[in-house]
Each structure stands twice: as C-alpha cells, then as structure tokens.
Amino acid sequence: MKLYVVSGLGADFTVLEKLNFDQNLEVVFLDWLIPESQEEFLHYVKRMADRIDDSQEFCLLGYSFGGIIVQEIHRVKPAKKVVILGSIRSDEEKSHLIKFGGYTKIPRWMPERFFNDNSTIVYTFLRKLFDPKNPRINNYFRVRNPYYLKWSIEKISEWKFKKIPDIIQIMADKDIVFPIKNSKPDYIIKNATHLFPATKPKEVSAILHEVFKI
C-alpha cells in the first residue's frame, strides 16, 4: 500500500529521514508546490492531491503544516488511514499566537521581504518556536521561497476545520508550535519539541509500525 507523506512548513524530508516505515508500505513523499499568485487554499490542496493515485487504497501522513494539508487532501481523496505528526485536528486546537494571527490578519499584511534569506526576523522566530537548542534546525528548512512561506503562514493562521473522526494524532509534550494542552492526541512523545520526528525517531517509528499494520 502507498503511504503519501507531506513534510512541515518550509521543510523537505530531511526532518523525517530517520523514521522507519513498515516494509509493506511504499512511501511516496509529496514535495511542496509553490503556490500560484493569489491561489486559494483549496485549489492548492487539489493540486497537491492530483499527484495521488486513488485507484487503489492509500494512506496519508503529514507533519506540522503537512498534517493540515493531508487532512484537507483526505476530504478530496479519502484515505484508508490519516496520521498527523505535530499537527492539529481542528482550528480549535490552534495556539493563542496562531489564533491572534488569524483574527488580526497580520500574516497577510507582512511584507514578503520578511520571508527571504536576507531577513532574520522570521527564521529567528521559527527557530525559537521549533527547537532553539537543535544545531541542525536550519538544515530542515530547505523550501525558502518567500511567497510560499508567507502564503503558508497566512493559510495556517486562517485555517478553519472541523475535526474529522479517526484522524490519528501524534504530538510532543513540549511542542510550542502546537501546544499539547489544546489537543487530546492519540500518542504523546515525551520530552520532545516540535522537531520530534527528527529527535525521537525510534519512538515515532514504533508508533507508525503499530498504526500502519496491514
């Protein structure tokens, strides 16, 4: 069975490279697409979903913003199982900071130059949120197109979604991006930050083997 995987905001699959998947799964990584100018979120989701072959059963796995994307894909092309890592199952689970961004529309009005490599503002903020003590954190952020980053942060802050039954949620107990206190996850990774797929791969892999038993 194919398992389609979407990584986190601005991240390639380096952050997930230490995960071990069941040998019965054919893992297919879906790279981020660069949004079209003024592209609506659902149109973008459909473009991501276009690369999925739904002629046979498949599963979905998403990390962080990728967790939001795979849930939206699930509404377009239903999967047999959907697992989210370090992500949320509804807009009610957002942190106060993200909700504030949605209410005020601040991300929408932030200049695009804030998101380019010459600006340290956004990257410094993201490092503090994700895991300020991890020396490899910059290695995980490989997708640095300024428009993509700005667009994605806008969509996260404005995302409205009702919880879908049976979405399997795995979270870290020290995640600041998506605080565990706002959710009731199925699995909790102890003593871990938002980067837990990279820092606690054995624990995460054991859960994934259990979840994706075929």
Image (cartoon, helix red, strand yellow):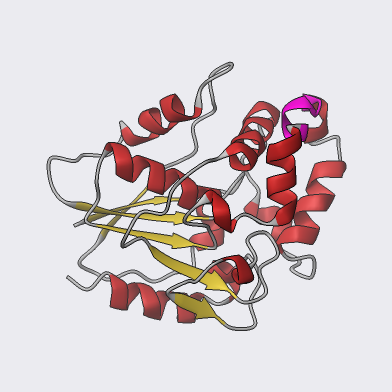
- Quadrant containing the N terminus is bottom left
For the point 65% across and 66% down, the residue is: 179
Residue sitting nearer the eye, 190 or 156: 156
For the point 39% across and 71% down, the residue is: 20
Query: What's the magenta region?
Result: 106-112
Where is residue 26 drawn, in percent x and y? 25, 57
Q: Describe residue 34's horizontal placement relative to residue 191 as left or right.
A: left
Q: Is residue 183 above or below residue 139?
A: below
Name the residue furthest top: 37
Where is residue 146 drawn, in percent x and y? 70, 30
- Quadrant containing the C terminus is bottom left
Image quarter for residue 51?
top left
Q: Is residue 49 above or below residue 11?
A: above
Where is residue 126 drawn, in percent x and y? 75, 52
Q: Is residue 206 above or below residue 101?
A: below
Residue sitting nearer the eye, 35 or 136: 35
Residue 116 in sight: no
Residue 2 in sight: yes
For the point 72% across and 55% down, the residue is: 96
Where is residue 104 drawn, in percent x and y? 76, 35
Find out whether residue 107 is within the magenta segment: yes
**Magenta span: chief secondary structure:** helix
Find out whether residue 42 is within the magenta segment: no
Label total for image: 0
Name the residue furthest left: 55
